Image (cartoon, grey):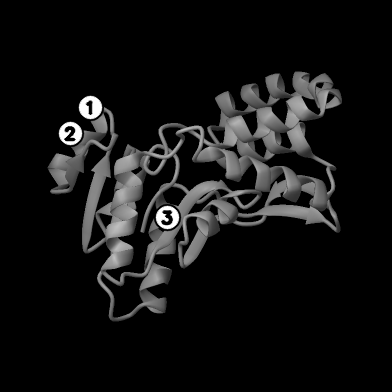
Amino acid sequence: MFDLDGTLTFHDTLLPFLIGYALRHPARLAGAWRLAPALAGYARDRDRGLLKARVIRSAMGGAQRGQIAAYAADYVRRLEPRGVFRGAALATVEAHRTAGDHLVLLSASPDLYVPSIGEHLRFERTLCTEIKWDGERLNGALTTPNRRGNEKVRCLEWLRTQYPDAAIVAYGNSASDLPHLRRADRAVLVNANARARRLAAEMGIATADWQ
């Protein structure tokens, strides 16, 4: 089970996705003022899921499904040539594939493009934050909990019901990944900051640096 942003990739994938879409549709930039109240709201409630929904709605709300799908396909196709994926991460994915393991991508980033990344990297399953549509137009609200922190624990426990005889090996990169990493049969915290590494050591979770 692999996290995406910062684990398989060198950086976040959502913000570049949204910025790229806005740059292709300059009229969207006129709505950038909505980001200020969204950030102010986050400063008050610390709700990352609500912030994510507000930012997605600001950048893409009301856009047609086919338009977003075409952009997402192009976005994902360009990730590897641009060096977004960590070579050591992809090598680890391939080692698990060669061993015959089930590959699961688990990300807090949205299903606007994460399933396409999962398909591109030939993962068996992709679990990520799901976004609401009004028919063929993007609403932008979340239809699942933001798949971060304890929500990843719930996803891990659900996966145990799907693969009851399998040991779970999990990879993540931040302190927010530690709750589900400690529930895995084996876990590695990669590319983490000093605080997350210290917490991982206290929990007996291995650490590594992937380039």
To which residue does mark 3 refer? Answer: 152
Q: Along the polypeptide, which appears first: circle 3 or circle 1?
A: 3
Pointer 2 local density, CA inside 10 Å: few below 14, some 14–19, many at least 20 = some
Residue 8 vertical placement versus 34 (above, below): below
Does residue 158 appear anywhere in the picture? Answer: yes
Q: Are marks 1 and 2 in contact (CB under 8 Å)?
A: yes
Q: In the image shown, does 52 or 64 lie closer to the viewer?
A: 64
Q: CA distance from mark 3 to mark 2?
A: 21 Å
Q: Quadrant of residue 133?
A: bottom right
Task: Judge left or right: residue 51 versus residue 197.
Answer: right
| Residue bearing mark 1 | 194
**Helix, strand or loop under label 1:** helix
Between 155 and 7, the one lying in front of the other is 7
Three-letter residue code for mark 3: Lys
Q: Report which quarter residue 55 is drawn in.
A: top right
Quarter of the image where one finds residue 116: bottom right
Q: Position of residue 202 (x, y in %)?
A: 13, 42
Residue at 29% across, 34% down: 211
Q: Residue furthest bottom?
A: 165
Q: Which residue carries the number 2 mark? A: 198
> Residue at 83% of width from left, 20% of height from top?
30
Q: Mark on residue 134?
A: none
Q: Amino acid at mark 2?
A: Arg
- Secondary structure at badge 2 equals helix
Q: Residue 161 location, x and y as percent?
A: 39, 77
Q: Residue at x 53, y 39 (%)?
A: 79
Res 145 seen here: no
- Tag count in the figure? 3
User: Quick check: 198 left or right of 39?
Assistant: left
User: Looking at the picture, how far across and down is residue 122, in whole percent?
Assistant: 47, 61
Give the Cα distance between marks 1 and 2: 6 Å
Q: Are marks 3 and 2 in contact (CB under 8 Å)?
A: no
